[in-house]
Amino acid sequence: MPGFSTRAIRAASRVPAAPQPPLNVPIYATSTFEVADATELAELLEFARPGHSYSRYSNPTHAALEEALAELEGAEAAISTASGMAAVHGALLSVLRSGDEVIVPKAVYGGIVGIVSAVLERSGISARAVDTTDFAAVEAAMRPTTRLLWLETISNPTTAVADVAALAELAHARDVVVAVDNTFASPALATPLALGADLVVHSTTKYIGGHSDIIGGVILGSAERVAAARKIVINAGGNGSPWEAFLALRGLKTLALRMERHSVNALAVARVLEGAPGIDAVRYPGLASHPQHELAGRILRDGMAGGMLAVELAGGRAAGERFLGRMRVAVHATSLGGVETLVSHPASSSHRQLDETGLAEAGMGPGTLRVSIGLEDAEDLVADLLAAAAPG
Ligand SMILES: Cc1ncc(COP(=O)(O)O)c(C=O)c1O
């Protein structure tokens, strides 16, 4: 009879049969999977047969999240990643190689500016920053070496809306691949693949998770494009954890409801803040004053415009600091897409890589605040933010 330790390890590793499926996808907290023989393992590592070999390659909880998100984005395939930036990295490097050029929006998440200098430029890939709301500027920026056009459905933090369909047509006519970061819209509001995008990425940290308790990402597209991205993700060690995948799946169940409430709350706040004392401008795609209001109405579902606002305070940086110190309901924190309202100051956080000129080019000033409207009562948010913005 084997000793106690041997028996304990075996006894505690028996996976129960569960003939009645649980309502929720189990967390497969295992780094590895038992195989019958070397051929099976070799084939699993090559994705030549269904199943799982090692959780850096795939894991059933990841697979459930990937299938769910692929269905909701209208994608053939998906790969979940350890963070939104791991998804951005995998998507970029699956398309670009040394000598290629990528066009990125001037108004874009600061992490893109970071990965361009920290990774792409070191790898012989150059980036050209363009105002992607200006069709002619995008066309003029295209070179024979341009391989990829990077877009954000709604830009971070200035909320510029991308005309994905028109830009995809322009790009495809020149053999340029189109990747869209759909984080701000979420699949509940927009599905860029249906508009012509080739790849979509999300930071699932944001609306998909929805509760500010995970870091994760996903890359979606055709089976071929996702297979190429999977190679990058696996080799760079960018796969997500099954614990985070479980929470992303749980968040997904209420995504539509949350996006509805985020959108209703954000519109209520945007309408009151626009023109309020101490505020120069409010940028929110749901406002008639937004430059792409009509486009937003076409590409975002059911007239919703999501929960993200950019607020330009009249008093610049000092007013920004005063605003953050006065808030009682909203929380001063980076990130977005959670149930709580978060306010951040891009010039000192997500876009700290940019100097004043870079900020201006990205459509921001030193007093621009990024506001992620949560699910609190709208009246409480309006009162809190109005009081925080009041001059003097
Ligand atoms: C639009 C957008 N894309 C990607 C990311 C990166 O996501 P993560 O922080 O999960 O790596 C962020 C994070 O703020 C984001 O706002």
Image (cartoon, rainbow, N blue to C red):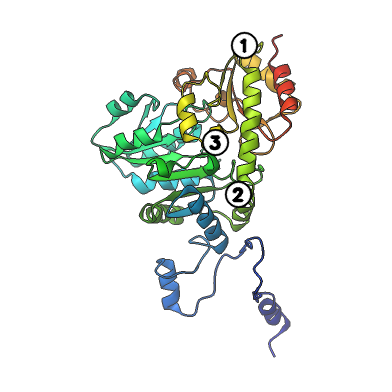
In this figure, which residue is indicated by the disc labeled 2?
252
Residue at the far front: name it. Answer: 302
Q: Sequence order check: which comes first, mark 2 or mark 3?
A: 2
Task: Name the spot of residue 188 as percent of width and height, x first.
Answer: 55, 42
In this figure, which residue is indicated by the disc labeled 3?
302
Q: Secondary structure at mark 1?
A: loop
Task: Give the left or right position of residue 43, taking residue 285 as reference.
Answer: left
Task: Name the spot of residue 232 as percent of width and height, x first.
Answer: 41, 52
Task: Give the left or right position of residue 127, taking residue 67 as reference.
Answer: left
Mark 1 surroundings within 10 Å by alpha-carbon count, few (fewer than 14), some (14 through 19), many (20 or more): some
Q: Residue at x 59, y 54 (%)?
A: 245
Front of the two marks 3 and 1: 3
Task: Name the spot of residue 377 as percent of width and height, x first.
Answer: 74, 31
Q: Residue at x 39, y 32 (%)?
A: 104
Inspect this view and state whether residue 343 appears.
no
Q: Amino acid at mark 1?
A: Gly
Task: Give the left or right position of residue 364, taking residue 248 as reference.
Answer: left
Q: Sequence order check: which comes first, mark 3 or mark 1?
A: 3
Front of the two marks 2 and 3: 3
Mark linked to residue 99: none
Q: Secondary structure at mark 2?
A: helix
Q: Are marks 3 and 1 in contact (CB under 8 Å)?
A: no
